[in-house]
Structure formats: structure tokens, C-alpha cells
């Protein structure tokens, strides 16, 4: 494993669907507790409490004719264009997702062939040495793809790797579960290239998987509505346990990654965290700075898109990065020499973090 080769981001892309779904669109839903008991509070109160906790005001849903592989292809094309890379020179295409392609009106997961093969086919890449595979790793999937790509590049096995995160969570949400308001659709992509002696690039990363008590904090299950007779499976979660788990563990994983890279808290210009829950992400940042004895958290260090885009799982972080690098997120920039922390948490339960020098 070469310590002189750095994995450098040479292109980014994203695809944010144009269909805006505001919170008021859930006003007529019938919500139930996990026990199957109907929630008797007015929906306006349920929705307002949801917004207060998550900070989500609206989210984006994919067009009916588009599936996850389509969104991934759009983001990948965007990244390839921005990098000026010949797609035939890609050594790997890693596609992070959790539910494959799902047709509208269905919850059936389609992963044959893999989304990575579908996207490679659509990109028109003929090179058989370009290896395409999927990575189901919960919401941290895109970041784990970046970590795997870094291993390939530093081992000398790859020169260029395309990493994509794509998801259509709107198609696996239970309309009778208030948590359904969290989820969204989207895709983001990055291209990494190995460069000898580069100052910029990935400096360090770390991943953890907790399964003792945490394995089923996120799971697939039946509708919360006991009167709905169906074999359909929807995304389900224990929000309180996830919140507590994330606050306890994510800051520690970030700190350990920073220590591996020789990065001090004062060196960090941005922290790009998976857009899961606005209040949770803010609490994670405060807990991180508290580990370094800092009580006043500089909130401009953590850009957020969740209020308008919702939680699109593997797509949140690469989309956030693409928007900042292309000056599409007001008030946030990443400059040459900036040290940026990436972090994510999600089903598994999995946590990962990465430090990158721009």
C-alpha cells in the first residue's frame, strides 16, 4: 500500500429531482403508531413537531419514469463531464444504494443486473477491465465506496474510480408512518484519481459496524396501518435509539479519523455530515467540538441541505459536496488547502468518517 499516492477528487456530480413535496402534502395522511394504534393528534400538529425535530420543510421525489439507476447515471454523467475524464479509463464503478431500482407503485427491489452494471451500460463503457459493482451499506454507502476506492488506488490496483450514491426512498416509505416524511430521492457522484506525491487528497478514514443491540434500529417491515393487508415491506426505524446511538458514537469516530490524519479541530474548515436529521446533525457537531473542549460551535462549518432536500440516504453527502464545489450553496465555499471532514451514520448500524485535504 503506497503512502506516496493520494486519492484525489477530480470531478463531482449530482442529480436533485425537480418534484418538490412540501410538508403540507402529508396533511391528509392517516398516521399510526408502530403498535397499530391511530395517532389521534391533528396532522398539522404531527407535521409541525416533525419539522421542529428534523428541520425538514420539503423533500424531492423522482419523476415516475426515473429509477435509482437513472438518477445515478445522471449524477455520474455530470461528474464525468466536470472531470473531463474518458469513461473508458475508469477502473471501477462503485454504486452505493440500499433498495435497487423500484418501479412507481411497487416496493419490489430490482438488483439484477446490478445498478452499477446498468449505469456502466448506459454510459457506453466497453472496457471489461472497468469493474462495476453495488455496495449496500446503509446511508454511509457512498462514503464507504470512497474508502474502498482509496484502498484500490493506494494499492496500485486502480488509477480512477467512479463512486455513486443513488436512492429512491420515496418508493419504500409507508404512507401511514410519520417517519415517511423524512425520506427523499436523489443521487451524487465523485471521481477519484491516484496522484503520486499530491498534497491534496484523502488523508485518513475509519469505519465501524455495531450489531450487538443496534443491528435492527433500521429495518424493513409491514405498514403501521393494521387494516392494510399487503405483503409490501417499507423502511422502518427506531428514531430515538438511532439519535442516541449517533450522538454517542459518530463524534468519537470522527475524532479518531482526525487523529489518524494529524488533523486538529482548528484545521477543520467544513464538516459534511449525512443529512439525516437537522437537530441530530447539530448535536453531533456540538458533541465533536466538546471533545476538544470547545463549547461554542461555529455553525458555518457544517453546511445543511436537509430543510429543502430531505434525507436521500447515500446521496446526501456527495450532493452537498457537489453543490459547494460548484458554488450552488449560498454562504459556503471550499478553497484550496481546506481540510474537510466527511461523516455518515446509517443502517447496520454503520458509521464512517474521512478527512480530505483540498
Image (tube, rainbow, N blue to C red):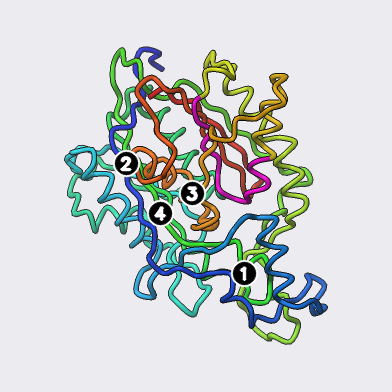
Of the residues under marks 1 and 4, which one precedes in the sequence?
Answer: 4
Q: Which quarter of the figure has residue 345?
A: top right
Foreground tag (2 vs 4): 2
Of the residues under marks 3 and 1, which one precedes in the sequence?
Answer: 1
Disc 3 to disc 1, C-alpha distance: 20 Å
Q: Secondary structure at mark 2?
A: loop
Please tell me which residue is depicted at 57% across the width and 41% down the height of the picture: 344
Q: Residues within 10 Å of mark 3 (few under 14, many from 20)?
A: many
Asked if residue 203 lies in the magenta stretch, the reply is: no
Looking at the picture, how far across and down is residue 126, in whole percent?
A: 17, 49
Contact between labelled residues 2 and 1, with CB atoms less than 8 Å apart: no
Q: Residues within 10 Å of mark 1 (few under 14, many from 20)?
A: many
Q: Which numbered tag is attached to residue 316?
A: 3
Disc 2 to disc 4, C-alpha distance: 16 Å
Q: Which quarter of the figure has residue 123?
A: bottom left
Residue corresponding to mark 2: 326
Disc 1 to disc 4, C-alpha distance: 20 Å
Which residues are the magenta region? 269-282
- As drawn, 256 above or below 82: above
Q: Residues within 10 Å of mark 2 (few under 14, many from 20)?
A: few
Disc 3 to disc 2, C-alpha distance: 16 Å
- As drawn, 110 above or below 209: below
Disc 4 to disc 3, C-alpha distance: 8 Å
Of the residues under marks 4 and 3, which one precedes in the sequence?
Answer: 4
Of the residues under marks 2 and 4, which one precedes in the sequence?
Answer: 4
Of 331 and 281, the residue lying toward us: 331
Foreground tag (1 vs 4): 4
Side of 2 relative to 128 (left or right): right
Residue corresponding to mark 4: 187
Q: Secondary structure at mark 3?
A: helix
Foreground tag (3 vs 1): 3
Amino acid at each position: 500500500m503506497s503512502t506516496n499516492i493520494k486519492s484525489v477528487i477530480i470531478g463531482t456530480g449530482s442529480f436533485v429531482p425537480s418534484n418538490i413535496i412540501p410538508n403540507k402534502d402529508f396533511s391528509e395522511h392517516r398516521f399510526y403508531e408502530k403498535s397499530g394504534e391511530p395517532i389521534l393528534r391533528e396532522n398539522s400538529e404531527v407535521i409541525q413537531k416533525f419539522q421542529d425535530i428534523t428541520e425538514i420543510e420539503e423533500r424531492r421525489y423522482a419523476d415516475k419514469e426515473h429509477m435509482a439507476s437513472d438518477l445515478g447515471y445522471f449524477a455520474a454523467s455530470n461528474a464525468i463531464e466536470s472531470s473531463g475524464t474518458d469513461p473508458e479509463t475508469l477502473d471501477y464503478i462503485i454504486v452505493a444504494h440500499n433498495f435497487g431500482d423500484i418501479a412507481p407503485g411497487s416496493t419490489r427491489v430490482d438488483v439484477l443486473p446490478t445498478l452499477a452494471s446498468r449505469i456502466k451500460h448506459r454510459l457506453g463503457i466497453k472496457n471489461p477491465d472497468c469493474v462495476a459493482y453495488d455496495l449496500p451499506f446503509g446511508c454511509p454507502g457512498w462514503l464507504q465506496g470512497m474508502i474502498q476506492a482509496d484502498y484500490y488506488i493506494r494499492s496500485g490496483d486502480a488509477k480512477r474510480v467512479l463512486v455513486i450514491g443513488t436512492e429512491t426512498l420515496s418508493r419504500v416509505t409507508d404512507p401511514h408512518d410519520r417517519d415517511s416524511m423524512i425520506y427523499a430521492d436523489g443521487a451524487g457522484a465523485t471521481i477519484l484519481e491516484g496522484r503520486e506525491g499530491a498534497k491534496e487528497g484523502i488523508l485518513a478514514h475509519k469505519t465501524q459496524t455495531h450489531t450487538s443491540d443496534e443491528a435492527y434500529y433500521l429495518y424493513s417491515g409491514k405498514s403501521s396501518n393494521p387494516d392494510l393487508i399487503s405483503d409490501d415491506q417499507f423502511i422502518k426505524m427506531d428514531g430515538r435509539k438511532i439519535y442516541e446511538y449517533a450522538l454517542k458514537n459518530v463524534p468519537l469516530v470522527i475524532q479518531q479519523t482526525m487523529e489518524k490524519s494529524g488533523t486538529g479541530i482548528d484545521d477543520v474548515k467544513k464538516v459534511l455530515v449525512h443529512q439525516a436529521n437537522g437537530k441530530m446533525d447539530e448535536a453531533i457537531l456540538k458533541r465533536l467540538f466538546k471533545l476538544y473542549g470547545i463549547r461554542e460551535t461555529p455553525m458555518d462549518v457544517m453546511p445543511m441541505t436537509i430543510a429543502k432536500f430531505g434525507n436521500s440516504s447515500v446521496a446526501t453527502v456527495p450532493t452537498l459536496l457537489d453543490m459547494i464545489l460548484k458554488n450552488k450553496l449560498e454562504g459556503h465555499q471550499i478553497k484550496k488547502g481546506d481540510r474537510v471532514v466527511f461523516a455518515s451514520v446509517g443502517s447496520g448500524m454503520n458509521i464512517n468518517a474521512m478527512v480530505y485535504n483540498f
